[in-house]
């Protein structure tokens, strides 16, 4: 039977200690995927503390690269991510969190943070570029 969150603290620490925290701010990459649809919802960073909190509480915690602190997804909005399963990559420096979202994942209130295709990005950039050109001319 595979281990699934929430886990006892001693097991969470053992697992966290095995990971390779080699990304920015000594973090691992976390890819967050909806467990029922396999849709990728977001990508974030996790330090050792965030990994342990995620494994012991069963709710996704991340390391904020800008605020330099651990935060629980949904702590203010209520849109938490209940962790169903955690899968570790072959290099031990990335985690796949399979989750049950309790609301939209993106801060824009969209279900996934991945909602801009390349065409939309280009149109948005061109609009800003044209607006800037008008102001400068």
Image (cartoon, helix red, strand yellow):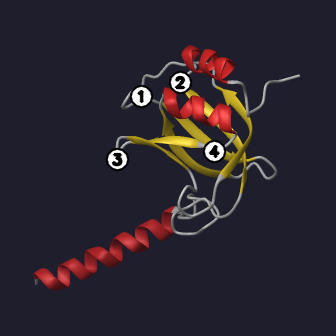
Q: Secondary structure at mark 4?
A: strand
Q: Secondary structure at mark 3?
A: loop
The C terminus - image quarter:
bottom left
Residue ID at (67%, 38%): 57
Q: Secondary structure at mark 2?
A: loop
Q: CA distance from mark 2 to mark 4?
A: 14 Å
Q: Few, some or many C-alpha atoms within 10 Å of disc 1 (few <14, some 14-19, many ≥20)?
A: some
Given contact means CB atoms under 8 Å apart, are the residues at marks 2 and 1 in contact? yes
Disc 3 target residue: 67
Q: CA distance from mark 3 to mark 2?
A: 22 Å
- Quarter residue 111 falls in: bottom right
Given contact means CB atoms under 8 Å apart, are the residues at marks 2 and 4 in contact? no
Q: Residue 23 — which label?
A: 1
Mark 4 or 3: the one toward you = 3
In-image side of 118 versus 41 (left or right): left
Q: Few, some or many C-alpha atoms within 10 Å of disc 3 (few <14, some 14-19, many ≥20)?
A: few
Disc 2 target residue: 93
Q: Earlier in the sequence, mark 3 or mark 1?
A: 1
In-image side of 86 versus 113 (left or right): right
Q: CA distance from mark 2 to mark 1?
A: 8 Å
| Residue 60 location (% of width, % of height) | 61, 43
Q: CA distance from mark 3 to mark 1?
A: 16 Å
Disc 4 target residue: 32
Residue ID at (35%, 41%): 68
Q: Few, some or many C-alpha atoms within 10 Å of disc 2 (few <14, some 14-19, many ≥20)?
A: some
Q: CA distance from mark 4 to mark 3?
A: 20 Å
Establish if 30 lies above or below 1: below
Residue ID at (57%, 69%): 109
């Amino acid at each position: 039977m595979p281990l699934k969150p929430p886990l006892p603290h001693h097991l969470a620490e053992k697992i966290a200690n095995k990971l390779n925290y080699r990304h920015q701010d000594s973090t691992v990459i976390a890819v967050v995927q909806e467990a029922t649809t396999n849709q990728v919802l977001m990508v974030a960073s996790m330090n050792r503390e965030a990994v342990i909190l995620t494994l012991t509480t069963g709710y996704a915690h991340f390391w904020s690269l800008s605020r330099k602190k651990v935060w629980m997804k949904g702590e203010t909005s209520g849109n938490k991510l209940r962790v169903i399963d955690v899968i570790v990559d072959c290099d031990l420096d990335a985690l796949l969190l399979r989750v049950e979202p309790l609301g939209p994942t993106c801060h824009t209130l969209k279900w996934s943070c991945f909602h801009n295709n390349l065409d939309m990005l280009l149109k948005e950039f061109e609009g800003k570029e044209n607006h800037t050109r008008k102001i400068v001319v």
